[in-house]
Amino acid sequence: MAYDSFAGFLRALESAGELIRVSQPLATELEITEMADRQMKSPGGGKALLIEKPTINGQISPFPVAVNTFGSHRRMAMSLGAESMDEVAQGLESLMKAKPPTGFRETIKLLGTALELRHARPKIVKTGPCQEVVHRFGDDFAKWKSADSSSTVPTLLNLPILKTWPLDAGRFITLPCVVTKDPDTGERNLGMYRIQIYDGQTTGMHWQLHKVAARHGKRYYETGQKMPVTIFVGGDPAYTFCATAPLPDGLDEFLLAGYLRKKSVELVKCLTNDLEVPSDADFVIEGYIDPKEPLRAEGPFGDHTGYYSLADLYPVFHVTAITHRKDAVYPATIVGIPPMEDFYIGGASVKLFLPVFRMNFPEIVDIALPAEGVFHNLVFVSIKKTYPMQAYKVMHGLWGMGQMMFAKYIVVVDAWVNVHNTSETLFHLCANTDPQRDSLFTKGPADALDHATSEFAIGGKLGIDATRKLPGEGFKREWPPLIQMDSDVKAKIDLLETLASKTGS
Ligand SMILES: Cc1cc2nc3c(=O)[nH]c(=O)nc-3n(C[C@H](O)[C@H](O)[C@H](O)COP(=O)(O)O)c2cc1C
């Protein structure tokens, strides 16, 4: 189901009892974080918050802030108009099963074709709510640069953008959908890369080394041409999810969004560059990056890792226009010590792409990224093992698949282990391994945010085979049975308990 706006999603959350309105003024600087963090740390992810009177330097913003809107399994599924992520994943799986691929390249091609077949191709429309209010920069950059939060000129300084943690370098847009195009092929990309506000008209652009927009950017730096970039926030929440989804380079995220919302994404042309954005977005920030300009320090920022990511050099983005809906809502998130809202977003991606993993590794039963591992630091995989060393084949395969390259620890367990239960998985890890025999150290690219690697963006990886050992795997003794109760005895005690609960004895 498609939402016609982010506000439409908020209405659905409210009717489902998933949203709390906060009517007292709350500062965009730190206070919203503290309130949101308490919800995110509540069992199951708490509730979404709608801060009706966010303040910027003491002044109430006309735009409410929504936070923690994806922060539970239920809200994450609701954002895609579904009851559960299993339902969404099953749909994609059956679509791809129509003609099973024979290799990874073919899987990616098939994913694209499958999405297109479902009328998911985006459409260009003439105009839309996201351009109801238009502020072009013109040549009067100075006016924008000097505007402060009390100015009537809507600049980046008087949008309710959060400063999330005390040592952050400033305010950051935390749910930005960043649109770029490959200058060689014209292929579009939608990615989520945080945006640090430098002044009313310039920002940082934190696309990390391995991300698709960074590759697009590299091409512009090679040719020296100005790079058009547009950032938008809000609209149908499916866009926000798709911007975070690790789709292969070259596959348009708007295709995935169209498939998920069962309705093509309607795109409008930007007013000051040649990119397109969803017509129902809440805020659109158009602009460019000039490769002739030096990179600029971005950060520190309290990050997904639970630590501050330190300042580093990134491109500078110049705003040429800001457009927005009249009734715009500003969606935001906070990241930090887990569990946080991003756990549910990352988990949804894994669920959705499990069929793609399975097409290449049919032995995979399930994959989980526990909250403690902050996205991909720790990966639990269960497999139906039929031959020796199969766990190692799966580890190598996963490290070679897209953003799974960032996984620091991969633990492989047998099919019957519930990888979404961290305690159960750790029990099997501890019980079934001889650390020396069952672990594999290797190296590879590391997440640019990982502060623990000795060098930036490269590091070690540990794979642990916690499956039951087969002949040929160096284990020469008898493998003992796992303790399990007799099923008749269990049934009898179930019955006794049911009777006792009915009679109250
Ligand atoms: C809340 C949130 C913030 C993120 N911030 C960044 C960021 O600042 N830089 C970055 O490179 N990736 C960031 N990511 C991860 C990317 O969005 C993710 O890797 C995505 O798949 C990138 O898209 P791409 O493969 O099209 O480049 C963030 C993810 C989430 C959920």
Image: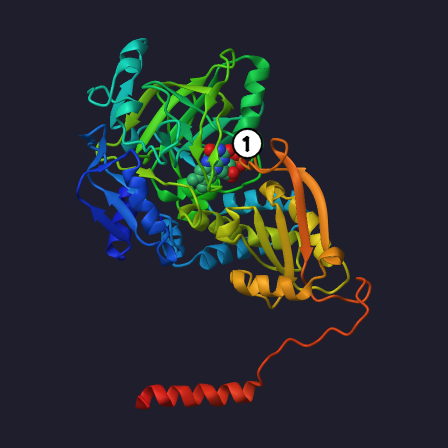
Q: Is residue 222 above or below residue 466?
A: above
Give me the residue at 60% from left, 31% from top. Answer: 456
Asked if disc 1 is less than 8 Å from ligand 1, the answer is yes
Q: Nearer the viewer, residue 40 or 320?
A: 40
Q: Nearer the viewer, residue 99 or 8?
A: 8
Q: Quadrant of residue 158?
A: top left
Q: Quadrant of residue 269?
A: top left
**Residue 63 in picture, x, y percent from top left:** 23, 34
**Residue 5 in picture, x, y percent from top left:** 29, 41
**Residue 153 in picture, x, y percent from top left:** 23, 19
Q: Is residue 207 above or below residue 65?
A: above
**Residue 481 in picture, x, y percent from top left:** 68, 77
Q: Nearer the viewer, residue 91 or 65?
A: 65
Which residue does the numbered mark 1 point to in the structure image?
A: 212
Q: Quadrant of residue 169?
A: top left
Colouring? rainbow
The amino acid pointed to by label 1 is Val
Q: Secondary structure at mark 1?
A: helix
Left or right: residue 264 compared with residue 363: left
Examine the rendering and report whether any part of residue 390 can be seen: yes
Q: Is residue 321 above or below residue 431?
A: above
